[in-house]
Amino acid sequence: MNQQHNWWKTHYFFLGKPVHLTPNWQHIRNTAKSSLSPQAQLKLEWIIFYHTQAKGHVTQTAVHFGITRKTVHKWLKRYEIHGLNGLEESSRAPRQVRTRTISLEERRRVRQLRLAYPRYGKLKLIQLYSRFYHTPMSSWHIQKVIEEDHLYPDKVKANRLRKKSVQARIHQRKRITTLFKEHKVNWLWHVDTVILTLPSGGYRYLLTAIDEVSKLSFARLYTTHSSRNAKDFLDRLIFLTNHELRNLHSDNGSEFKMEFEDACRQMQIPQWYSRVHTPKDNAVLERFNRTIQEEFVEVSEADPLFPEDFNQALTDWLIEYNFNRPHQTLAYKTPIEYLNAYYHEVLPMSSSPT
């Protein structure tokens, strides 16, 4: 069991402290914590494992972390040439970004035309612009000037139509009620945010996740309610599930938009959303949220004011939850026991990745 716990802690909290590190590697890891992004620190974990536990075996490193041999070779070479800084991803943003070419004078002319003819649409304004100023103007530029300067004859109606358009986009989201749920481990993970109020004022944000079938659970505390932190949480969840996560379910919170949505698209993970004001759509995770608050947050000495210490204590509690706590819905097995039985049944010639 101790060996299983060590595996879980190294993989589950992959920026923690692995056992039996030489002082040199420990110093490198400590330096990376204060200077590298979480993604680069993860790549350092690959390199540390390669040089220590894997004893220079690329295949063992690749299998252990669920990545390709090519990826291991790539980052080993980057680290050898550039050191820690070489582990950061190079920016993929285009060197030349398109900018609006409309000038201040063109903007002034469009404003004058719109104010003179407030009921004319952009296609009519194009003709007037060409007639008066003897130069072409695109409908896109005219539309942007109207939107940015709020040049609407009825601003109340325009705001109402804009809100209606936003609501229509929300309703176009794929709802969890339309997903066919297969009884497979990692087929569907639920994610959510629990807001913790600090006694001294302010908030902390506890992101939580649970597998629909195995009830394997994960959680991490953050200081801000941002899509960037939600993306970091997703990266850790993908790592925990050995890149086997197939569908992701959340509510309509802002933290699950922007960078989080971009990450899901890049990894081709479909997002499914709860219906508005319908917590029963995420009943499995709602129950886990209650458990983590009653059995950890409310009784632990860990203070959410200090996220690093809190997350270390949280990792210990999650180990207990996943390895030792029986679950009624699993016929009183633990999630790890269930996973071992599941993978033995599905893949009898392979060991469980968890």
Image (cartoon, rainbow, N blue to C red):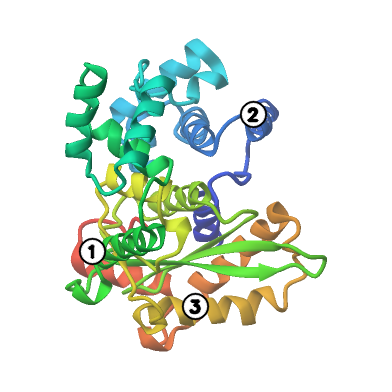
Mark 3 or mark 1, whichever is nearer to me: 1
| Mark 3, secondary structure of its residue | helix
Residue under the point 69% across and 55% down: 307
The residue nearer to you, when weighing 109 against 261, is 109
Q: Specify the amino acid type for callout 1.
A: Gln
Q: Name the residue under label 3.
A: 288
Which quarter of the figure is the C terminus placed in?
Answer: bottom left
Instruction: Inspect this view and state whether residue 86 appears.
Output: yes
Q: Mark 2 points at which residue?
A: 35
Disc 1: CA contacts within 10 A as few (<14), some (14-19) or many (>=20): few
| Mark 2, secondary structure of its residue | helix
**Residue at mark 2 to residue at mark 3: CA–CA distance:** 34 Å
Q: Specify the amino acid type for callout 2.
A: Ser
Q: Position of residue 250 (x, y in %)?
A: 38, 66
Decide: marks 2, 3 in contact (CB < 8 A)?
no
| Mark 1, secondary structure of its residue | loop
Q: Mark 1 points at which residue?
A: 172
Decide: marks 1, 2 in contact (CB < 8 A)?
no
Q: Position of residue 266 (x, y in %)?
A: 29, 42
Q: Position of residue 344 (x, y in %)?
A: 25, 66
